[in-house]
Amino acid sequence: MSPSDSTSPSDSASASTTPSDSASPTDEPPTGVCEEDDADYKSKLDAQLNGLPGKIAVGSGWHPFTLTVKNPTQTDVKDVVFYAGVGPNDPDAPNAFSTSQVQLQVKYDGVWVDVTDEEGHSVGYLDLADIAGGKTVTYQLRVNVKANAPIGEGLTIGGGLYFDEEENCLGSDEAHYIIQIVKAGTDTGGTEPQEGGKVPVPSEKPNQNNTQHATGSLAETGSSSMVPTIGLVGGVAVVVGAGALVAVRRRKGASHA
């Protein structure tokens, strides 16, 4: 319909007989992401990072912190995919930091292991686990900003993704903070990080190569369930569509029947 159509009384009368024309621009298809499709949706997870300084000097060694993900509801949240990463505070940055510049590790069975993707970036999945209502999962992490890391601002993040079966969509919660990378020898004592920045997310789906199994719960859940549960493809959370996810989960359930 051209702009001039609205100026003609006869045309407006005819247009009124097709109300679907005016409604169609607002009828956007669902994205499959709970928070995007429903402004009133409240995440069933609450992620927090604790122990991070606001500044880290290059070459200053390891800095420990924790990622806690709580389920504040009274119902269980199944198959939560946890992830963490460090990346530049730049919305246009294509990737997280390289492990050769900023190294991220998670403690698993008393041993520190690298959090990294298949391309050598400091971002990856920590685990797949269920969180009972009112319970919290805690991960011990540490970050090493090496001497060749760029001076400026870096971002450390962590969070969880889950499929909300009741709403048929992907839900998430993230904790992300801006941490300033400073020159060697700079006094960083007493500094605190600022909220904000870009959230680097692994670019591939969870699999055995990019998941650390930090809590060991993957053995109970079954590694084969990780890929079909959440079809995550990186950047800001992007899913293959709630319908496809539901179909995969139904096939998985049927196979166990």
Image (cartoon, helix red, strand yellow):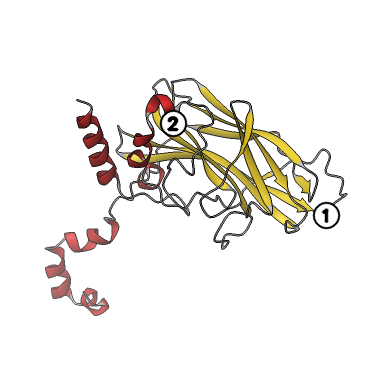
Q: Is residue 145 visible?
A: yes
Q: Compared with residue 72, is residue 237 higher up or lower down, i.e. above or below?
A: below
Q: Is residue 96 left or right of residue 224?
A: right
Residue, x 41% and y 52% (percent of image)?
A: 233
- Judging by the rendered image, the residue that carries numbered circle 1 is 183
Which mark identifies residue 243? none
Q: Residues within 10 Å of mark 1 (few under 14, many from 20)?
A: some
Please state the horizontal and vertical placement of residue 33, each as a whole percent of the image: 37, 45
Q: Compared with residue 138, is residue 94 higher up or lower down, i.e. above or below?
A: below
Q: Residues within 10 Å of mark 2 (few under 14, many from 20)?
A: many
Please state the horizontal and vertical placement of residue 80, each as a whole percent of the image: 43, 33
Residue, x 40% and y 51% (percent of image)?
A: 238
Which of marks 2 and 1 precedes in the sequence?
Answer: 2
Amino acid under label 2? Answer: Lys
For this rendering, which residue is in front, 143 or 71? 143
Q: Are marks 1 and 2 in contact (CB under 8 Å)?
A: no
Residue at the limit of the structure toward the bottom, as seen here: 4
Q: Compared with residue 123, is residue 15 higher up or lower down, i.e. above or below?
A: below
Please state the horizontal and vertical placement of residue 211, each as a whole percent of the image: 49, 39
For this rendering, which residue is in front, 225 or 41? 225
Which quadrant of the figure has residue 192?
A: top right
Amino acid under label 1? Answer: Lys
Report the quarter where the C terminus lies.
top left
Which quadrant of the figure has residue 23?
A: bottom left
Q: Is residue 112 left or right of residue 233?
A: right
The residue tagged with tag 1: helix, strand or loop? loop
The residue tagged with tag 2: helix, strand or loop? loop
**Numbered label tally:** 2
- Judging by the rendered image, the residue that carries numbered circle 2 is 44
